Amino acid sequence: MKKVLLCMIALIMLSCSSDDENIPLQTFISFNLDGVNYFLTEYQVTLHPLDENFRMIEASFDNNSKTIRFFVLLEETNQIDEFIFINNDRYYTSDVNFGDRETSITTHTDSNMEGTFRVTTDAISDKPVFTFTNGMINIEY
């Protein structure tokens, strides 16, 4: 009887253990834009159409009325080069050298990219300024 009880306890314990290896990792781009948090899981990664030394990442949100597009030098683990925010077909940018921004790409391989960003679009006389904070990149392609 003890053996049966021990076998049942062992079976229960084994059935309760989890297999973490089969849990897929979530890939995403997240940020706060002017006080609203966004978590994007759909994005496109391609080579820059004019310069194949850069990878182009693009993600649309808010019923496709807004898009972020940014470029990173292939295999570069330093910063985002060009950052573009498109809002209702109007383009807003952040200058890579003089813009109000902090970007850090910590991992960039042939298959994934990780990093963080904080970007404020450049102030141009007739355009509003947009601020992206707490930006995180964790994508696979």
Image (cartoon, grey):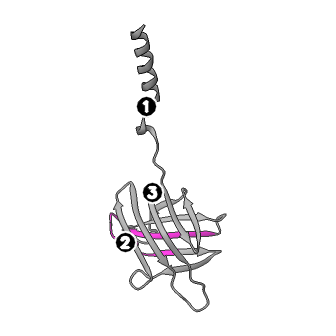
Residue that lies at the very extreme toward the bottom in this rendered image? 125
Circle 2 residue: 79
Q: Secondary structure at mark 2?
A: loop
Amino acid type, label 1: Ser
Of pointers 3 and 1, the one earlier in the residue sequence: 1
- Residue 38 is covered by the magenta coloring: no
Circle 3 residue: 139
Q: Secondary structure at mark 1?
A: loop
The span from disc 1 to disc 2 (Cα, nearest Å) is 41 Å
Residue at 33% x, 63% y: name it. 75
Q: Secondary structure at mark 3?
A: strand
Residue at 45% x, 66% y: name it. 56
Question: Quarter holding the N terminus?
Answer: top left
What x and y, as percent, mark residue 21?
40, 38
What x and y, as percent, mark residue 137?
45, 62
Mark 1 near mark 2, Cβ–Cβ under 8 Å?
no
The span from disc 3 to disc 2 (Cα, nearest Å) is 15 Å
What x and y, as percent, mark residue 113?
39, 59
Residue 18 against residue 100 in the figure, above or below:
above
Camera-side residue of 95 and 1: 1
**Is 35 on the left or on the right of 109, as rendered?**
right
Amino acid type, label 3: Ile
- For the record, the magenta segment spans 66-84
Mark 3 near mark 1, Cβ–Cβ under 8 Å?
no
Of pointers 3 and 2, the one earlier in the residue sequence: 2
Question: Quarter holding the C terminus?
Answer: bottom left
Residue 17's label in the rendered image is 1
The span from disc 3 to disc 1 (Cα, nearest Å) is 29 Å
Mark 3 near mark 2, Cβ–Cβ under 8 Å?
no
Residue at 41% x, 76% y: name it. 102
